[in-house]
Amino acid sequence: MTSHPQFQVSFHQAWVLLACGLLGIQSWSQTFTISGRVTDANTGEYILGANILDAERGKGVSTNVYGFYSLTLPSRPTELQCTFIGYAPATRNLIGSKNVEWNVSLSPQSVEVDAAEVLGTTGQNTESTS
């Protein structure tokens, strides 16, 4: 018969392990998830690559081929912005205490750029061809 080593934990060690476990649960519960789809307001088509951004925290995601996104943030007030080139941005203020669904319809918007001026110079070939 082989003897098994006994595992002994002091009250202090047990308390530290319990506290660490509870802190992990508490920090996990201090986040919320926002998810949804981004579509074109005129056609209803999904927008691939639209950006959902919490600029204050520098955290964001891009939509997939189905216009879907999911972003987990700390549970505190935040302002999210949804952007895509050629569309007017959309914003939403959130309190951030529970999971939220935000489906966004972006409206097309023309993009204005300044005129580009192209300058060039010509040269003369001075090499002989013989």
Image (spheres, helix red, strand yellow):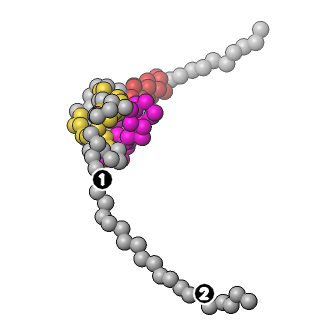
**What is the x, y in percent for residue 38?**
34, 33
Q: Quadrant of the N terminus?
A: top right
The answer to whether 26 is drawn above or below residue 59 in the figure is above
How many marks can you see?
Answer: 2
109 or 84: nearer the viewer: 109
Badge 1 crowding class, 10 Å Cα cut-off, few under 14, some 14 to 19, many 20 or more, is few
- The residue mark sitting in front, 1 or 2, is 2
Find residue 62 and report its horizontal and vertical position in percent.
Answer: 41, 39
Residue at the image position 50 percent from the left and 23 percent from the top? 10
Callout 1, which amino acid? Val
In this picture, residue 6 sits left or right of residue 61: right
Q: Residue at x 44, y 26 (%)?
A: 21
Residue labelled with disc 1: 111
- Name the residue carrying label 2: 125
Query: Is residue 53 highlighted in magenta?
Result: yes
Q: Secondary structure at mark 1?
A: loop
Identified at 27% across, 39% down, the residue is: 107
Numbered badge on residue 37: none
Report the residue that reaches farthest toward the top: 1
Label 2 residue SS: loop
Quarter of the image with the C terminus is: bottom right
Location of residue 113 in the rendering, given as x and y in whole percent from the top left corner: 31, 60
* Residue farthest front in this picture: 130
Residue 84 showing in the rendered view: yes
Name the residue rendered at 32%, 35% in the picture. Answer: 40
**Residue numbers of the magenta segment:** 46-74
Residue 87 falls in which quadrant of the image? Answer: top left
Mark 2 Cα within 10 Å, few/some/many (few <14, many 20+)?
Answer: few
Q: Amino acid at mark 2?
A: Asn
Decide which of tag 1 and tag 2 comes sooner along the chain.
Answer: 1
Instruction: Look at the picture and state if 24 lies above or below 86.
Output: above
